Amino acid sequence: MAHHEFVYREPGTQSRAIALRDEKSLSPSYTRSYGFAISHGSGAEVWDADGNRYVDFAAGIAVLATGYSHPRIVAAIQEQAARYIHIGATDFFCPEPVKLAEKLQQIIPVHHAAPEDKRVYFANSGTEAIEAALKLARYREHRSHLIAFYGGFHGRTMGSLSLTASKNKQRGGYPYIPGGVTHVPYPARNECNDCENNGCCSQCWSDAVGFIEKFVFKKVPPREVAAVVVEPIQGEGGYLVPRADFFPRLRQMCDKYGILLIADEIQSGVGRTGKWTALEHFGVAADIVCLAKGLGSGVPIGAIVAHDNVMSKWVPGAHASTFGGNPLACAAGLATLNVIEDEHLMTQVTELGDYTLKRLQNFMQHHPSLSRVDGMGFMIGVDFKDAQGNPIPNFRDEVVNQAYLNGLLLLGCGESGIRFAPPLVLTKPLLEEGLDILEHTIANVEEELWVSAED
């Protein structure tokens, strides 16, 4: 098992002081679960305000693709800031968004599109990228309806919230969420014990395409459906990977009825799964690809990449953003993509991700609380269930909190899971250290909270 020395850490005077000031000045809507207050970071390591060191398996919610303060990202930001920080790409020409757009044309797959057939729109976040994609998809005549998936998270602004269905707390209290969206079950593999060989049952409806054609199209004619919006791997919903035939069949269905396929690659894109987009693992491409999070290495940026046949429908003024295409954010974005290429980070992510999956699956042989390990690259989910197969969110929360005290930053996902989403620059020694801490923590929590079937 673990071979690293475990040093107990807890928030010190400085961290507690920051948390207290935060409580008195910032919105109570944030979801902190433990008391980490950052001082600085390097690569996949961070230090709190009291000097405690941590391995980071969260990467600022899967944002810090190149880690903390990568020298090339820092240099790109400093050089751009010294020239100019803002000009307004909506009204003036600016080289930085052009350079980043040309790069995205080359690397982001779009259905039936050569690089010169793609167009890029820049926003400032993931939810803004989704909003842009929704407006673009609905800009076509007589098509206004959307199909999304239960468990999906696409943002918190009112338009993107109409698609989000991962936690009722995110939608509760907002009575005027836009309509025109039908949600269907997400066909996650390894989710239902009643389905042998990824078959279909009434519990999980793993045949999502069949569900759409059999039920949704009874409610909404396919000719009125603008788009299907989907995460290639569900993020907040639990880091769930779909069954292998889902996306090829979904692509075929969309082509049959002239429906656009929108891939929400905000969490799964920019190399996190070992490819530029997670959808590439399934051998298909979307009509509109939404990007954000890792694209700017921590600088806020969002983008959609679409076929020119789709985006050319927009006329000047149909959609825009004051800060979208901000030169500083675009400089950071281009530097991020170049670092991922030059340092062969996607190869590293694939190799270390495979190693992580094997080691976590080995955890399952020794820890009865673990019910599922699945994922791709550095996007891996782990679920906890009791002896009767029921989710145990309090157990998960205790693992996350104790891991922090042992020196590992984690975030939960789904009803009873944790996510493995470290910076892409994570090294093998730091990976080993973090996994040692995780297994040590799970063992401790099992000893404290696990209730066997015989008890």
Image (tube, grey):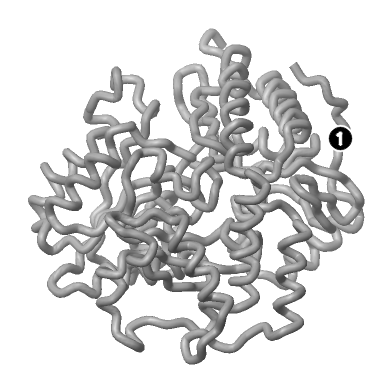
Establish if 298 lies above or below 209.
below
Q: Outermost residue, top direction?
A: 454
Q: Is residue 192 visible?
A: yes
Q: How many marks?
A: 1
Task: State the image coordinates of residue 214 (x, y, percent, origin top left).
Answer: 11, 42
Residue in view at x 54 percent, y 81 percent = 323
Residue in view at x 16 percent, y 68 percent = 143
96 or 63: nearer the viewer: 96
66 or 34: nearer the viewer: 66
Residue in view at x 42 percent, y 70 percent = 120
256 or 8: nearer the viewer: 256
- Type of amino acid at the residue the image marks with label 1: Tyr
Q: Secondary structure at mark 1?
A: loop
Rendered-image quadrant of the N terminus = top right
Q: Is residue 395 visible?
A: no
Task: State the image coordinates of residue 245 (x, y, percent, origin top left).
Answer: 28, 33
Task: State the image coordinates of residue 173 (x, y, percent, origin top left).
Answer: 42, 65
Q: Outermost residue, bottom direction?
A: 91
Q: Which residue is mark 1?
A: 8
Establish if 317 lies above or below 390.
below
